[in-house]
Image (cartoon, rainbow, N blue to C red):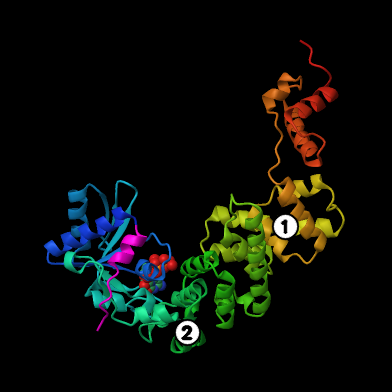
Amino acid sequence: AGSRRNLSGRMREMLPRDAVTALERLGGLAAEAGERAFLVGGLVRDIILHRRNTDVDVVVEGAAIDLGNRFAREYGWHLHAHQRFGTAVLLGPEGERIDLATSRIEHYPYPAALPEVEAGSIKADLFRRDFTINALAVELDGTRFGRLLDLFGGLQDIRQGTIRVLHSLSFVEDPTRILRAARFEAELAFQIDAQSLRLIRNAVDLELPARLSGHRLFRELRYLLEAGGAVEGVRRLAGLGMLRFVHPALEAERDGAVERVEAGRDVLDWYRLLFREEAPVRWKVLLTLLLWKLPPEELGDALTGFEVRSRDAHRITGDRRRADRFEQAVIGGAVRGEDPAGVFEHLERISLEIVLALMAVTGHAGVREAISHYIQHLRGIRGALSGSDLIELGVPQGPEVGRWLERLVRARVRGEVNSAEEERELVVRTEGPVNE
Ligand code: CTP
């Protein structure tokens, strides 16, 4: 089986020259020890698809750590070995990185458990992987350098745009693959094939994703939300009945959840057109929108279950509350959309991500317009004068300085002052001239 296709030309075209050299050397060292080394995983897929990817994963039919040690000694790279897993990371002088593993067979003691591992052939290693498009390998030793090892029809599936599992227990062994299937499908504009789709539906009917830890589920969900095609991915998950494993409350309102994520994507696109820098963190915007109907305490619990860093979880939950308060304040008339200082005071306390999420989700045009104005004209406004500038101008040391700093920001926001000079004039006019 297999194809005679050789990818070495394409590798030279797509990878930095040093990376190709390192791979040749690695293949050479493996061959000297009578072992074979292969490039595997997403990078092989992406080389064929002409997509950028920097994750270099190498599998050795042999001892990965020993090979890594020989390579590090010979070529002056650093090696970080993980003895427990038999894996190693090679770090090059220019920041290059190669992940090394011994080819292995995995046994799953029970569904959704983490696997037990033993050494095996490259074929067994590839067979344990998620999809055919990710189960291609490229030989790395001298005469065969670049030769594609295609044991499961991955090349044809890449060409046809098909996401297909290698065997019928794939989603039973690892239900996170359901999220991965949705992600690859949306990101690559591929299609999950009919049989794989049936297997997903079986796994969902058996409630297997419920056995995943929040941490593992969220990890893949986050990748999906960060990927191109996040909305299509979430729509696919909704269609598969998978959203309830993200949170039970999403089962009843799946269409609403997808629509909110879509609105979030549109707001993020709008933001990207306006500004090129300081990109908001997409998953924070989209996840908050997915879970928007949860009361803030339940949002906090969900984030904790996902093992989101507690600093992030607190921030998101607090911002979610502040966003509600702002929306209510505008709707109730306590803050007028045309009052820049009022809008500024509320929104400066909320992270950009949750401000954008509110903009996407609010049903109130006044709230949306106030946020739009804030983002385009007010966000990040600061006064020019420092505390010591103020003291020099005669402001008494102490709390008065802080009050002045805030007042100058408000004056800026209202457009009453527009430069350091005008700030100075405002201070002097109010405090009286400096006596020296
Ligand atoms: N893999 C798997 N099952 C999983 C996760 C990963 O079989 N639940 C396999 C896949 O074959 C994948 C490889 O492990 O190619 C590396 O995983 P990862 O780096 O997460 O994915 P990539 O395929 O590299 O995808 P991407 O680069 O888009 O993240």
Q: Image check: 95 left or right of 71?
A: right
User: How many numbered discs?
Assistant: 2
- Residue at the image position 64 percent from the left and 52 percent from the top: 275
Which quadrant of the render holds ligand 1? bottom left
Q: Position of residue 67 (x, y in %)?
A: 19, 59
The residue identified by callout 2 is 200
Q: In which quarter of the image is the N terminus?
A: bottom left
Query: Looking at mark 1, is its residue's CB closer than 8 Å to ligand 1?
Result: no
* Looking at the image, residue 333 lies above or below residue 60: above
Q: Mark 1 points at which residue?
A: 323
Q: In this view, does 145 lie above or below 125?
A: above
Residue 5 among those drawn in magenta: yes
In the rendered image, which quarter contains the C terminus? top right
Please state the horizontal and vertical placement of residue 236, each as a whole percent of the image.
56, 79
Query: Do the residues under discs 2 and 1 have CB atoms within 8 angstroms?
Result: no
Q: Would residue 123 be visible to someone looking at this image?
A: yes
Read off the magenta span.
1-15
Q: Indicate which label's residue lies in the foreground, 2 or 1.
A: 2
Q: In this view, does 196 lie to the left or right of 310?
A: left
Q: Does the magenta stretch include residue 143?
A: no
For label 1, the SS is helix
* Residue 65 visible in the picture: no
Q: Which residue lies furthest to the top in this view?
A: 436
Tell me the amino acid under the disc marked 2: Ile
Mark 2 CB within 8 Å of ligand 1: no
Residue 176 at what x, y percent from top left?
45, 74
Q: Which residue is depicted at the point 51% across and 87% down?
A: 205
Residue at 35% x, 79% y: name it.
Answer: 154
Q: Check disc 2 and report its element: helix, strand or loop.
A: helix
Viewer-proximal residue among 240 and 12: 12
The quadrant where residue 421 appears: top right
Q: What is the distance, in whole Å, between disc 2 and disc 1 at their CAs?
A: 37 Å
